[in-house]
Image (cartoon, rainbow, N blue to C red):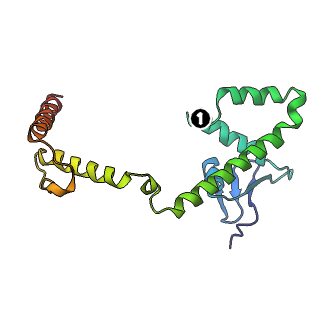
């Protein structure tokens, strides 16, 4: 049975294959990235030398995602990281990055907690319910003109009354859009 409190131990064999010691099967870098995304700590050890290769493989995962266009790190941040390896600032960069990411994690956690406490976060916005009802009535009115629509127009008390010439104008515009779409 896996112990989620301990890091998942991955062994790298001489063939460079990665072996998950908990499930007794081989894994890929994408599998390791998936473990990390679910919150699991991972430790990658070279079987022959016993060296910890975790940092090397984590950097490789980041590099692969960045090269696929899944950019998270702006170029100026990457440039500053490269500069930090050749300057006196090198000693404070790891502590700064760690503190920054901890603040990010804490902020995300608090935001999720706050959002989950409110059934619908937008419901607290003044006038939201009236706006939602107007939008719903408008959509029902538009859909009446759509061929194949079996719904009915909204009742008069559902929304503010719409002048018949406004409704005719909306239907005309919708018909024109349908003709243009049919030509495409």
Along the line of sight, the residue nearer the viewer: 133 or 82 = 133
- Crowd around label 1: few <14 · some 14–19 · many ≥20 (10 Å): few
Q: Residue at x 84, y 52 (%)?
A: 48
Residue 134: percent from left, percent from top: 26, 49
| Relative to 72, residue 110 above or below | below
| Relative to 134, residue 178 above or below | above
Along the line of sight, the residue nearer the viewer: 158 or 114 = 158
Q: Residue at x 57, y 57 (%)?
A: 112
Q: Quadrant of residue 167?
A: top left
Q: How many labels sit on residues?
A: 1
The secondary element bearing badge 1 is classed as loop
- Name the outermost residue toward the bottom: 1
In this figure, which residue is indicated by the disc labeled 1? Answer: 71
Please state, as top left, top right, bottom left or bottom right, where the C terminus lies in the image. Answer: top left
- Whether residue 123 is visible to the viewer of this picture, yes or no, is yes
Residue 124: percent from left, percent from top: 45, 56
Residue 177: percent from left, percent from top: 17, 32
Left or right of 91 on screen, residue 172: left
Residue 24: percent from left, percent from top: 67, 64
Q: Which residue is drawn at 82% across and 29% down?
A: 84
Q: Residue at x 87, y 31 (%)?
A: 89
Along the line of sight, the residue nearer the viewer: 87 or 158 = 158
| Relative to 148, residue 79 above or below | above
Please state, as top left, top right, bottom left or bottom right, where the N terminus lies in the image. Answer: bottom right
Along the line of sight, the residue nearer the viewer: 111 or 15 = 111
- Whether residue 16 is visible to the viewer of this picture, yes or no, is no
Left or right of 10 on screen, residue 111: left
Left or right of 153 on screen, residue 37: right
């Amino acid at each position: 049975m896996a112990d989620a409190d301990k890091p998942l131990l991955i062994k790298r064999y001489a063939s460079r294959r990665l072996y998950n010691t908990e499930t007794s099967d081989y894994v890929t870098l994408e599998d390791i990235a998936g473990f990390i995304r679910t919150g699991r700590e991972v430790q990658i050890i070279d079987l022959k030398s016993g060296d910890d290769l975790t940092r090397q493989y984590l950097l490789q995962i980041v590099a692969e995602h960045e090269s696929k266009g899944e950019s998270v790190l702006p170029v100026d941040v990457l440039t500053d990281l490269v500069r930090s390896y050749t300057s006196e600032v090198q000693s404070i960069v790891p502590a700064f990055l760690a503190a920054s990411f901890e603040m990010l994690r804490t902020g995300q956690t608090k935001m999720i907690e706050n959002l989950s406490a409110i059934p619908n976060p937008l419901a607290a916005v003044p006038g939201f319910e009236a706006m939602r009802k107007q939008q719903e009535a408008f959509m029902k009115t538009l859909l009446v003109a759509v061929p194949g629509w079996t719904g009915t127009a909204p009742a008069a008390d559902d929304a503010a009354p719409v002048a018949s010439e406004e409704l005719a104008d909306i239907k005309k515009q919708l018909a024109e859009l349908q003709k243009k779409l049919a030509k495409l």
